[in-house]
Each structure stands twice: as structure tokens, then as C-alpha cells.
Image (cartoon, grey):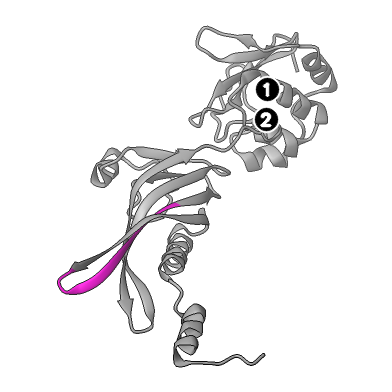
Amino acid sequence: MRVRWTWVTVISVVCLLGCADQREPVAREHLSQQVASQSGGALAFVSMTKTNGFEHEREGMKLYTIEWETTLQVNADGWKAGWRDFQVGPQQPNALAAAVEGTSVRRLLRGGTAVLQGKSEMQKADRGWRVLAWEVTGFKIERPPDAPSEGRSTDINAFFQAFKAAVASRNNQTLVKFIQFPSQRDVRAGRIWMPAETESQFLAQGFPFSDEEVNAMMKVAAPRQHEDGSYDLPTDYSALTFTKNRDGYWKWTNYYIAEGGA
């Protein structure tokens, strides 16, 4: 059977191959590039879904606005005040910076996600579509799921059991995940102190507990709560205090040595 090709058939086939709507892929690629170039790796583009779109004109230009929802993976702890760009700050912005953005400062935690709603304005050019501007219109920050074995737990009981397992390992690389850094080294007649002020100092020294202390800690079934909301792990040798850090995770913050202790 011979196929009879007409100009209408040829044009239809060419259109199927080359006339597909490229507006959504172009907007997605542009957004992905902005995230990569501006965040310095602190954020990673995951996906973008078109939620709406409409054609319009401005000053004689034929434009198209695509509305979207995008998901970003948080790869580094940081701070964000507004979404005029994708830069993530290592320190909390001051009140003036937040006022300029017109929004509250939000904490980003590694392993979490940022779900953004926004829109991109596009113009038809000789070689396809191009993005003229983009804007985030709404967002939701989702914290990472708890991982007690990594020292990331909002539940004191889960933290406590994971902490005891880290102590039982007698390994500083494992235990360091449960300590709040930088810590304040507070020595009062040798009674109140922390093993180190920084993570690197802690990793460079020996394991902080004797075998007797480790064995004593393993016998404590549950942490003891204090009136200020903190908890501790008491033994005849010492008491270790746990408090929540600014991210809501429990951490080891103080080490009280008992009279006659190590």
C-alpha cells in the first residue's frame, strides 16, 4: 500500500516533530539554572509542575505567563529572608534585612525541602521562547525527617536511646553528631565542662568517657527532666545535660562531674 503525501500531510508531520509547545520546558530549564547559579549548591532543583498559564500583551509585546510549583532540596543549613533570589545565607539576617524583604526570616535545614509557588513571564523570540522575569508568590519550608542515629531528633526519648548507642560505640566520629557546637567551655573547679568547644577539637582528642562511665550510662533507662525543660543522664560518676538547639533538635550541652568523679 502506497502512502500519498500531500503538503498538508507534510506540514502536519513537521509540526508534530518541531512545533511542540516549549514554554514549560524553557521555564523549567531557566528556573533550574537560576537555582544552580545563585544558591551555590545550598539548594538543588528537584521538579517543576505547571499549574496554570495565560497569554497577554504589554506595550505591544505578546507575552505568556506560566504559573508553577517547584520543589527544591536543601543541601546545606542556612537562612532565608524572602525569595527574590535563591541565595542562602550562612547566618541569620538582621531585622533590617527581613524588613527589606517584607517577610519573616526562615531557617533551612539540610535534608529538608522548599516547595515554592511562582510564575515566569515569557516572550516569543525568533528561536523560541525566553524568560523575561520570574517571581515566587508563595512557599512552604519542610524540615527534614528525624534521624536519631544522626543526632537529629525532636523527640527526647528517641534522642536518648540513640545517644546511648553512640556512647556504647566508644567512637568520637559517632558521638560528635550529638553535641551542640560551638559549646561554651565552662570550668568551675573542674566540675562543669564540655569535652571541647569545637567539633574539630573533639574529633582530635580521645574518647571522653571511661569504661566505668559508659557502663553506668547504659543502666539508665530514661532521661530525667528538669523544670527548665532540659533533661539529663545521671550516674554516680557524672550527669550529662540535654537541651534543644535553635533548630528544635536535642543535643548534649553540659557535662557535670560528680565529686570524686573522673
Tell me if mark 1 has few (under 14), some (14-19) or many (20+) residues whose alpha carbon lies within 10 angstroms of its own. Answer: some
Q: Is residue 190 visible?
A: no
Mark 2 residue element: helix
Give the x, y percent position of residue 26: 43, 69
**Picture disc at residue 62:** none
Report if residue 67 lies within the magenta region.
Answer: yes
At a point 65% along the width and 40% down the height, the residue shown is 201
The residue under label 1 is which amino acid type?
Ala
At a point 41% along the width and 48% down the height, the residue shown is 116
Q: Which residues are magenta?
A: 58-69
Residue linked to disc 2: 148
Out of 127 and 243, give the one closest to the viewer.
127
The majority secondary structure of the magenta stretch comes to strand
Out of 165 and 84, give the one closest to the viewer.
84
Give the x, y percent position of residue 189: 61, 16
Out of 183 and 54, give the one closest to the viewer.
54
